[in-house]
Image (cartoon, rainbow, N blue to C red):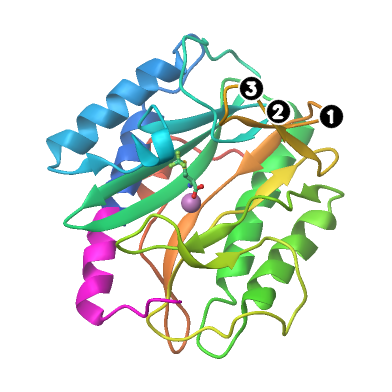
Amino acid sequence: MIHIKTAEEIELLRASNQLVSRTLAEVAKYIAPGVTTLELDRIAEEFIRDHAAIPGFLGYKGYPKTLCTSVNQQVVHGIPSNYHLKSGDIVSVDCGVLFQGYFGDSAYTFAVGEVSDRVRLLLKTTRESLYKGIENAREGMRIGDIASAIQDHCEREKFSVVREMVGHGIGKGLHEAPEVPNYGKRGHGVRLQQGMVLCIEPMINMGRKEIAQDPDGWTIYTTDKMPSAHFEHCVAIGKNGADFLSTFDYIEKVYSFKTN
Ligand code: MF3
Ligand code: CO
């Protein structure tokens, strides 16, 4: 069942997602060679609690941390650890909060120091594909329109779309219906209605699309060990377009997204 949100609920979801966006910007200030992903996690947890909210992932199905930090070949759900980021790495930082009864959820992939041109293209293309998907997030369109826009944009650069992991509805639950895949066919799938709130989160691999799960029970990685990028926004479906509940503006004030 898809929960259609009232205007009041959408404002609560905006507050939660804005806090996620500000938390990601706080974390972004510290991303540099040498920092550990566990240090980033502590910064995020403290920031969230200082804003009267609760980390949204901590304890969710037993997940042990505030952030998911997925480095290089890790696709999503990497667990913060004592790993020191180094120049040339990329790290997806995925953050969720629970605030006033509603979840926020957004993610951004950062380049650490200097990364290769092909890796930069992977980040740029994945980020662009998210916005191409969101262009289709309006009343009367279908989930398949979002999905195919993302897929077409990434496959044009010969990158591949992860199949098993998908975006989702969000509200009082972190993961609500419908599923939002990043591949599919135009005109197929659930019809979008005003008041639906979706997390759209392309997970795009430089090499092959196949993934596997680490014995830690969480970390998803590419089986060919090539890098993977992940960007996520939360949007409300409107009559004439998407209403962005999360934003990368705060992040990109402290972190410059270099495209070449
Ligand atoms: N953005 C991720 C997702 O939607 C966050 C979930 S991590 C979990 O799957 F630990 F909470 F599961
Ligand atoms: Co999500």
Going by the numbered disc 1, the residue's amino acid type is Asp
SS label for mark 3:
loop
Residue 195 in view (yes/no)? yes
Residue at (21, 65) in percent of width and height:
12
What residue did someone put label 2 on? 73
Task: Check disc 3: other Cα within 10 Å, few if <14, some if 14-19, many if 20+.
Answer: few
Quarter of the picture containing the C terminus is top right
Going by the numbered disc 2, the residue's amino acid type is Gln
Does the CB distance between marks 1 and 3 fall below 8 Å? no
Is 138 placed left or right of 12 in the picture? right
Going by the numbered disc 3, the residue's amino acid type is Pro
Provide the major secondary structure of the magenta segment: helix
What is the quadrant of residue 182 in the picture? Answer: bottom right
What residue did someone put label 1 on? 224
Location of residue 246 with respect to 118 vertically, above or below: below
Does the CB distance between marks 2 and 1 fall below 8 Å? yes
Q: Position of residue 245 (x, y in %)?
A: 35, 63
Inter-mark Cα distance, 3 to 2: 15 Å
- 87 is within the stretch colored magenta: no
Q: Position of residue 120 (x, y in %)?
A: 69, 36
Q: Which mark is residue 215?
A: 3
Provide the residue span drawn in magenta: 1-16
